Amino acid sequence: MKDNKYQVVIGLEVHAQLLTKSKLFCGDSTAFGAAPNTQVSPISLAHPGTLPKMNKKAIELAVKLGLALNCEIERNNYFARKNYFYPDLPKGYQVSQHTAPVCKGGSLSIKVSGFAEKKVQLNRIHLEEDAGKSIHDADPQYTCIDLNRAGVPLLEIVTEPCLHSAEEAFVFLSELRKLVRWLKVCDGNMEQGSMRCDANISIRLTGESTLGKRVEIKNLNSIRNVKKAIEIETERLISVVEKKETIIQETRSFDADKNITFSLRSKEDADDYRYFPEPDLPPFQIDEKFIESVYSTMPVLPEQLKELYINKYSLSEYDAEVICSEKPDAEFFESVTKYTTNYKAVANWMQGPLKFYCNEINISITAFPLKPETIGTLIHMVESGKVSFNNASTKIFQALLSAPEKDPHAIAASLNLLQESDVGAIESWVDDVINSMPGKVKEFKNGKKSLLGLFAGEIKKRSNGKADMQVVNKLLLEKLSVDQST
Ligand code: ADP
Ligand code: MG
C-alpha cells in the first residue's frame, strides 16, 4: 500500500449453507440443481396457517463448527425476524438470530507465507435462513425468481475487523472452507453459492486506532474474487481520501470482468430492519449433554492431524499440509500406511499419479478405483527394485486403472517390466554402452560430468527400461572412475 501511509481494515461475513437434507424450518429438500420452485412448500412461503419447526441437525452442525473454532456456545437461543422487502424474500422477513447468536467469539489461525501465524478473531456465528434467487438472464423482459433456496439453513460467520490485507482474507477463507468441508458442515462450493462472502473494508492512517468508515462488498462468489475485490476497493478508498473527498458508507458490488466495484445502495442501519423476536418459533436451549454428544462426533481437526503427520510420519510441512487439506485425502493416506511405512512415498504417489488421474477425470479421491493396498504394493515393488518408479507410476498404474483387481506383479511381468537388478546382466549393458561411446567417455574423463545422464539413459534404452537405475549409476561411476585412474 502507498508508502504504508494507510492501513486497510477488513471484516468478513461468510454465509455457509449447512449440509442438512431439509430446510431450516420445514421438510423441503435442500438439494442443489432441482427445477426452479419445486422445493417450495407453503411453510417455506409462510402462508397463513403454517408454522415453522426447527431442524435439529442445523443446530448440531452450528455447534460442531463453534466447538472447532473455540467459540462460546449460547445456551439460550431464540430467533428474530429481520424485516425487509425484496422480491426473492417470500415471507417479507428473514428468520435469523439477532441478539443471541448460537456461537460467540472464537478464532481461526492462519499463516500467510512470510508472516507469523495469526489468530483471526471471530465476532459470532449465527443461524439464519437463506432467501430465494433472482435470475436475470433467463428471460429478456422479466427477472425470474427461484424460491428453492428460500429457507435453506445458513451459518453466518462474522469476523472482527482484524484482517489487514487481501492476502490475509484469502488465507482465512481458504482455511475456513477447508474446516467446514472437513467437518461436513458445508460443502464449501462457492460456485453453487453454498459458501458466499461479504467483505467490509475501511482504511485509516497507519497507527490510528479508530476505525474508518466502511464499505461492504456483497456476494463475492470465489475466494480469488474476494482477494481481487479487496485489492481494488482498497485502492479506490485511498484515492478518495487522497483527493480529500469523503468516503460514503455504502454497499457495493464487484464486477470481476471489469475489475471494478460499484455502488449498489447506501448502507442500512439495524433500525431499518425492525427486528423482533420470531413469535412462531419457541426459544430453544442447548444443554451440556447436547454439546457433549456433538463433541464426541468431532473428527481430529486438520491442524492437529498435520502436526501428527509431521511428528509421527516425519512428513515435511508441505506434504502434511497438502494431505490434510481434505479429509478424504488424509483418510486415503492413512489407509495406505497400513501397507507400507514409506510415508514419503505415499505422499509422493498421492500428489503425483493419483492426483493427476483424479484431476484428469474430475473425481475426488473417494472415487479413486484402486485399493490402498494396491498402492502399498506398488510402493513395495519400487522400493525393492522390482520395477522402476517411472514404469510403476505410468505403465503399471495405467494398466491397473483399467483392471483394478489385477495383481500389480502379474501386470509388471506381463508387460515385461520387471527390473533387472542382477549385477551381472546390468554390467554387460554398462560395458556395451561405455565401449560404444569412446568419444563421450573421453569427454567425461576430461571433466564433462553431465554426460553421466547420457550413459544412464542409453543403458535404460538398451535394457528396455528394465535395468535398476540405482545399480546402473553405481556401476557406471565405478567403471568410469576406475578407467580414469588407469
Ligand atoms: P452489519 O451486520 O450491519 O453488516 P456488523 O457490525 O455486524 O454490521 O459488522 C459486519 C462486519 O463488518 C464484521 O465482520 C465487522 O468486523 C466488519 N466491520 C465493522 N466495522 C468495520 C470497519 N470500520 N472496517 C472494516 N470492517 C468493519
Ligand atoms: Mg453485513
Image (cartoon, rainbow, N blue to C red):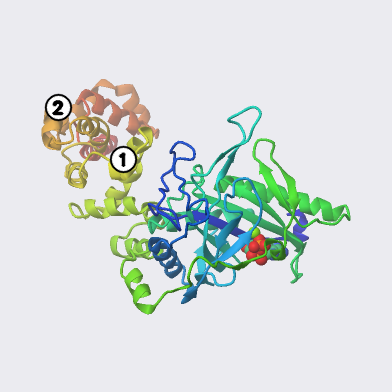
Q: Nearer the viewer, residue 209 or 297?
A: 297
Ligand 2 falls in quadrant: bottom right
> Quick check: is the Cβ at mark 1 less than 8 Å away from ligand 1?
no
Q: Nearer the viewer, residue 74 or 341?
A: 74
Q: Earlier in the sequence, mark 2 or mark 1?
A: 1
Which residue lies at the image location 73% right of the left edge and 54% below the top edge? 1
From the viewer's perspective, tell me whether residue 475 is left or right of residue 364: left
From the viewer's perspective, tell me whether residue 45 is left or right of residue 252: left
Mark on residue 354?
Answer: 1
Which residue lies at the image location 60% right of the left edge and 57% below the top edge? 93
Look at the numbered disc 2 and give the secondary structure of its residue.
loop
Identified by mark 2, the residue type is: Asn
Q: Nearer the viewer, residue 399 or 469?
A: 399
Residue 421 seen in render: no
Q: Give the number of the mark in front: 2 or 1.
A: 1
Using the image, determine if residue 236 lies above or below residue 282. Answer: above
Mark on residue 416?
Answer: 2
Q: Callout 1 environment at 10 Å: few (<14), some (14 to 19), or many (20+)?
A: some
| Residue 452 horizontal/vertical position (percent) | 33, 33
